Image (cartoon, helix red, strand yellow):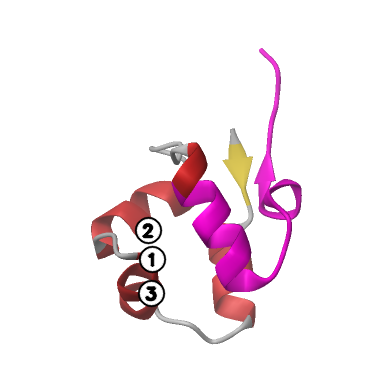
Amino acid sequence: MKNRLEEIRKERGIKQEDLATALEVSRQTIGSLENDRYNPSIVLAFKIAKYFDMTIEEIFIYEED
């Protein structure tokens, strides 16, 4: 699954550390999400979407194999 997390975060001038704190995860988790090394749990995906006031589909792009 691809995502636009880094793009959206940078557009809004938010540091990885600040996003991690707001979402109650580590900065490494944010980095892993942004580099497509980790897919978020559904709970974390909802938290991210709510934080940015967006839908999950606007942030995460599901691609079938």
| Mark 2 → mark 3, Cα distance in angstroms | 11 Å
Element type at marker 2? Answer: helix
- Say which residue label 3 marks: 22
The reply to whether residue 35 is visible in this rendering is: no
Residue 46: say if magenta. yes
Q: Earlier in the sequence, mark 2 or mark 3?
A: 3
Q: Position of residue 11 (x, y in %)?
A: 64, 80
Q: Are marks 1 and 2 in contact (CB under 8 Å)?
A: yes
Identify the residue shown where x is 48% and y is 82%.
14
Few, some or many C-alpha atoms within 10 Å of disc 1 (few <14, some 14-19, many ≥20)?
A: some
For image coordinates 68% across by 71% down, the residue present is 53
Give the residue drawn at x 62%, y 71%: 52
Report the residue marked by disc 1. 23
Q: Indicate left or right for 14 with 21 as reference.
A: right
Q: Position of residue 24 (x, y in %)?
A: 30, 65
5 shown above or below 38: below
> Relative to residue 55, is residue 10 drawn left or right?
left
* Mark 3 Cα shell of 10 Å, populated few (<14), some (14-19), many (≥20): few
Q: Amino acid at mark 3?
A: Ala
Which corner quadrant holds the C terminus?
top right
* Left or right: 63, with 2 as reference point: right
**At which x and y percent is residue 22?**
38, 74
Most extreme residue toward the bottom, as rendered?
13
Residue 20 percent coordinates (x, y): 34, 68
Count of number-bearing discs: 3
Element marked by disc 3: helix
Q: Which quadrant of the rendered structure holds the N terminus?
A: top right
Foreground mark, 1 or 2, reads 1
Residues rendered magenta in the picture: 44-65
- Nearer the viewer's eye, disc 2 or disc 3? 3
Residue 4 visible here: yes
